[in-house]
Image (tube, rainbow, N blue to C red):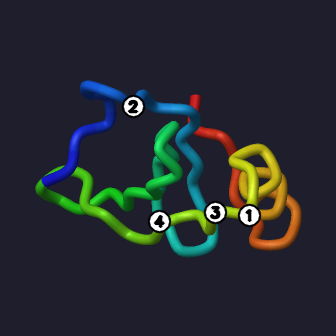
Amino acid sequence: MAKLNGKGFKLIKKLINPKTGLVIAIRSDKQVLRRSPYGYKKYVRIKDGVSIDTAIKHLMTKCGYKEVR
């Protein structure tokens, strides 16, 4: 299981895909975690040349993710 907050990184944003129900969390170390029944697991990593804000904007506009409240 992966931590959302820890030493050297913190949670930036949680997003949900309403079509599939997939919940992802984006950390400050550019790691993307997906929600499983047992907690969060490492899913993908944002590439070095891409900023976190750009990745969030892409997920929200192109992939249909919404912000979790």
Expressed as whole percent of the image width and height from the top left, the position of residue 68 reads: 57, 38
Q: Quadrant of residue 3?
A: top left
Residue situated in front as seen by the camera: 59 or 20: 59
Residue at which label 4 appears: 22
At label 4, the amino acid type is Leu
Badge 2 is on which residue?
A: 9
Q: CA distance from mark 2 to mark 3?
A: 16 Å
In the depicted view, which residue is nearer to us: 20 or 44?
Answer: 44
Residue 49: mark in rendering: 1
What's the residue at 58%, 48% (across, down)?
15
Q: Nearer the viewer, residue 61 or 17?
A: 61
Q: Quadrant of residue 19?
A: bottom right
Please, what secondary structure does the residue beneath circle 2 have? loop
- Which tag, 4 or 3, sits closer to the chain's start? 4
* Residue linked to disc 3: 48
Kind of residue indicated by mark 1: Gly
Identify the residue shown where x is 12% and y is 56%.
38
The nearer-to-camera label among 1 and 2 is 1
Residue at the right extreme of this rendering: 61
Contact between marks 1 and 4 (CB within 8 A): the answer is no
